[in-house]
Amino acid sequence: MVNLELYRVFYTVAKFGSSTRAAEELFISQPAVSQAVKQLETQLGTTLFNRTHMGMELSSQGGKLIFKQVEQALKLLEEAESTLTQLQTTATGTIRIGATDAIFSNILADKIVEYNVKYSAVKIELITGTTPETLNQLKENKCDVGFINLPVDDKDVNFTGTVAHLSDIFVAGEKFASIKDKKISLSSLHEYPLLMIENNTVARRSLAAYTQTLGIQLSPDIEVENWDLMLKFAKSGMGIGCVPREYAKEMLDSGELFEVDVVPSLPVRGVGIALPKGTPVQFALKEFIDMFS
């Protein structure tokens, strides 16, 4: 097996022509330098230096034959180290971000634009999927960072914090104006047509888990695959939708929808950051994550 430190000592001795100078350069003792040279000579089966009163000079049948190649090899290693160092201190390369459409639109979009202005050399790849899909992407090394709906319990990824809070509420359009400004018990919502996000989502599971603790079971009349569709259906009067207030803000502010005053209210959820386990965070990605601190 190649011992790079032996070759580094060999190169330094050859460069300075002195084991004493090499020891000073490498911050090791002079006997350690002599021992390393002797060990490499034994390993290669040849004499690498001629010891003279002037110092150490490369032997014609040993050291001179390999010096240039050792020099090139060490230079290549230094360049490789420099490349990795730059990754830790310079925003370059590509960052792959995974999230749902809604998280991209409502939470990440402005930050991505801001980041692109600051680090235009970094390529940004957006990978859309549900939270379970994003977690799988992280575990398969197809994604560098995931912004996911919480709560999630997955020990195969690292969770590093919460970047936003989501307040699930029930919203309705003009068709249900009769219940506007009235308190409606959560248990009585089954009397109305309900719109819910599809079953394999964190939002739906969170709603089901909470209502079950109250002994309430709510079943959707219509399941939708995304929040935009939910809001459109609610506005048209197809039913009362359950959606994060943050995603419905524009339509609530415009009066196209109103919030149904449900008692008790639903618990607040979060959007968190997840990273692959055992993978170092490069500088470019760290800079993006730090924008949410």
Image (cartoon, grey):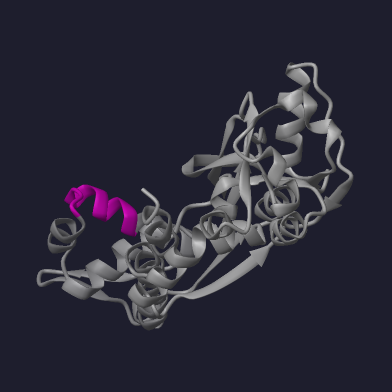
Q: Residue 56: image x %, image y %?
A: 20, 70
Please name whichever residue, 107 or 131, is drawn nearer the observer in this view of the structure.
107
Asked whether residue 227 is drawn in magenta, I would say no
> In percent of the image, x 66 and y 32: which residue is there?
153
Give the camera-side residue of 158 and 54: 158
The residue under the point 10% across, 69% down is 53
- Asked if 166 appears above or below 61 in the picture, the reply is above
Q: Can you see residue 276?
A: no
The tally of labels here is 0
Q: Quadrant of residue 103?
A: bottom right
Say if 217 sits above or below 195 in the image.
above
Q: Left or right: 80 with respect to 256?
A: left
Where residue 31 appears, as percent x and y from the top left, is: 21, 48
Q: Main secondary structure of the magenta part?
A: helix
Q: Position of residue 11 (x, y in %)?
A: 30, 70
Name the image quarter holding residue 12: bottom left
| Residue 85 relative to residue 195: left or right | left
Q: Residue furthest front?
A: 178
Residue 268 position (above or below residue 136): above
Q: Residue at x 68, y 49 (%)?
A: 135
Q: Quadrant of the N terminus?
A: bottom right
The magenta-colored residue range is 27-37
